[in-house]
Amino acid sequence: MGDVVSSHLDEGKREMIAVKTGAVMRQFSDVYKQQYAVALFNSIRYEIEGGGGPQSQLLHRKDPLAGRLIFSGNLFQYLEENRKWRNRFVSVPNNYNINLYESKTAHERSLHPKVAINCAGYKALTSIEDYIELLNTSLPDVKAKLGNSPFIKCATQFPLILWHPYARHHYFCVMTEKEQQKWHAVLQDCVRHCNNGLPEDCTVQTPAFTDSVRLHRQAKGHYGTWDMMCGTPPQILANLVMESLHPELRNAIGPRLKGKLQQRQRDWMFISDAVYRQVLAQTTSEYDALVETCKTQKVQMDTRLRTDMDQIISSKEHVSSKIRALVLPKAESLLKRSVQPYIDSILDALMEPTSRGFAEVRDVFFREVVDISKNLINGGDKEKLGEHMERLSMLAFHPVKMKSCYDNVEELNLEGLQQRFDVSSPSVFVSRAQILMREQMDNAVHTFEQLLQQSLTAQGENDMCKVIQGCQDRVLKKYDYDSSTVRKKFFREALLQIIIPYMLQQLAPACAPELPRFKELIFEDFSPFLLVENMFEEVVLQSVTKDIMMAVKEAAVQRRHNLYRDSIVMTDSDPNLHLLGKNSPVDWSTKFGNGEPEGSISGSGDADGGSGKRRKQVVSMIQLDEVPQPYESCLDVPGVELIPEEDTLASNESEEQAEADVCKEPTSPDSVEEIRDLINPVMEVVVPDEIKSDASNETPPTLSSIKLEDGVQEEVSHVTIVVEDVPTKSPQEKRSPHSILQQLVGNKKQEADKEEAAIKSAIEEIEIAVQEGGSEQTAEVCAAKSDSMGTDSSPHEEPEPVKKSVNGADNIIDPVEVDLA
């Protein structure tokens, strides 16, 4: 691997990569410094003038995952170094990075993980076919057939693959489909969270960054949405550099790669990963320096803005009116001709899956609360309530339970509109809708917790089910209102994100040459905060906003998809609720329980957010009762060359399943079946031929009692006749003489003296054998007994039946004639 990278990425190539990265960062830095001043002006103006949308009805919590662990478990990882599969312990902390350890012990000892994966920009795949389809785009003019296998072969039929267009791919596999589904949901949640790396509470830095990236791409001719706008700012900048650098290197290095197709794809992945890591390191350092530079100037700009805010606003309005007179007629013509006919169809495509997803969020919350009420009715107490509420508090961050909500939005399809409006894919809108759904679920759960705690404090713990139902109804009303507000805002932003780039691209050739002359109308002191390019975009935005607002309002008036009308504004509907928002989150395990809730694991290292503490896990561990776990520690699993074919795998799986079934049999002396045998003793005897003939006629005899030798009458509850051939064994006799005597009490009173004497002699010899404890003597006793009783037996006599005792030993029961009363 190192030879391939070093041979194709020499010092000259690395220097060229550094120069190109530096050039992109300088261009971006110039735009960012301008946009930072504009974003600061807009933030201070909003702060002074006030305003905002409708008030949220649900409460919010700042750090819901504090002290939490998302998931942990074992996976098989493919190692590129030796091309083998190894068992790894995987931990997903609350920052959603994937940490891989040698074993669970290494994780509990707070050691550093072997691998830490940041999932921003990745795709989680569960199919080799999907992975091959993505690999086809890795090399120019080379496409693998669908039937061809990649350069790895999975150890099981349940793969999990993390694919990235630039960074290294990661390969995992699990033993069952259930594991695969749960891990896939966790990996998708990691990708979704890491892609959302720009904090919304940064009212200056985040808008400045997003506008700078958009303007930088527009200068290169890319006006549409961008799939790689994901991750932290340095990661996004690395993707921005690789967008132009990657194809150039691929065309230069790709034809020089040697070997088969799979080997060339593997080598190119190593080279691309090395380039990406070099670019990411450079963008990280340069972006941090850029942010520090802007922060040093922020205090001075803030003072100037607050002093001259009125003059700056007046100057902006004057210049904007001039730009509006130039741009608005052209924008309205374009809007009427090429945009208005498609607004309703775009809105319908967005509303249908998004509204289904938010409705599923409501249903999931409702079902979870109803389950809590049912469990309390069936005998739950306050400790059970604490356990249920502890699990409910993390419902929004449970990838498996939220999967049904996320899957609805995955069906969003903009086919037919993507080419017209230059929308690369709907993934940008899908990810944003899923993040909003998770936020709404967490707000609903947090509000329910605070209301329930308040109600239990005021009304006591009597009739908890009625209290829970009352809090649930209040939360659902608030969720319906907030859900409508959030969705309408999402629809408006999505429409603008689709339409505005298209209009800017169409209007730029005619309007861009005229914009520089408007700079003369701006005072020099105000020029850092007023850019004609931003005012041009604001005019275009104002021209289309009216139509978008009208389309969303009409959808709400028609009561489609459970949207509230804009005229319905809930303000102060619950006066005491805002007081609860200042309270800290409820620790239900401390309030009602005595210990950690189920799913807790032992302390993790610094990578997981702290050591020496027990961190509660959001998703429960996977328990595989039906599948054996042959790799308990980090052992070598067969590599590529030693993996058997499908037929061999199928036979091995059947053998492993048979072994698992055998392991399920109880081996403890306290098992249920053996205890039942002690309570209800079972005696096995050999019946005479006439009873056997009755059994063959399917007329089993009916017995009521058996008279013992001491005259005691024992009741018989059930009689089972079994006729089978069982091989005779001769283990050490461990039964007591009394138990053997009970098996022989059914002899006829009319038996000959010779037979009675033989039976008594056999019993006495068995007692002597048991006391001496010798297996050889037991065999001699059995032989002597058979000699004394077997005068009438034939050479082809049936073998004696064997009865298995409670302690597991095989006891031989001699065939005798039994009188059944």
Image (cartoon, grey):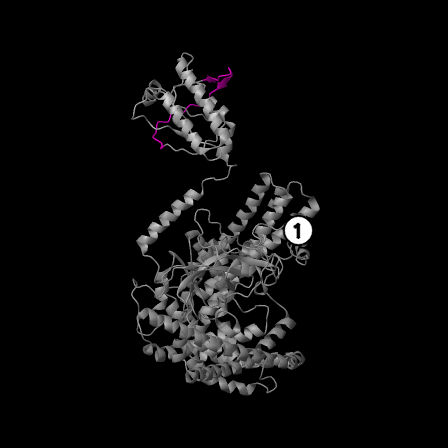
317 within the magenta span = no
x then y, percent, for residue 761: 44, 20
Q: Is 345 situated above or below 796?
A: below
The part of the chain drawn in magenta is: 704-727
**Residue in the foreground of this view, choosing between 175 and 379:** 175
259 to the left or right of 362 = left
Please give the name of the residue rendered at 46% of the width and 68% of the height, measured from the top-left corner.
121
Among the 4 quarters of the image, the one containing residue 571: bottom right
x then y, percent, for residue 700: 37, 21
Which quadrant of the rendered structure holds the N terminus?
bottom left
Which quadrant of the rendered structure holds the C terminus?
top left
Q: Residue furthest right?
A: 458
Q: Is 216 situated above or below 163?
A: below
Q: Is 109 situated above or below 807?
A: below
**Residue in the foreground of this view, choosing between 381 and 571:** 381
x then y, percent, for residue 631: 45, 55
Please give the name of the residue rendered at 59% of the width and 71% of the height, measured from the top-left corner.
203
Q: Residue furthest top?
A: 750
Q: Is 619 situated above or below 713?
A: below
Q: Residues within 10 Å of mark 1 (few under 14, many from 20)?
A: some
220 to the left or right of 588 = left
**Residue 332 in view, yes or no:** no
Check disc 1 and report its element: helix, strand or loop.
helix
**Residue in the foreground of this view, choosing between 533 and 221:** 221
Main SS category, magenta section: loop
Label 1 amino acid? Thr
x then y, percent, for residue 94: 56, 61
Q: Which residue is mark 1?
A: 590
24 to the left or right of 290 = left
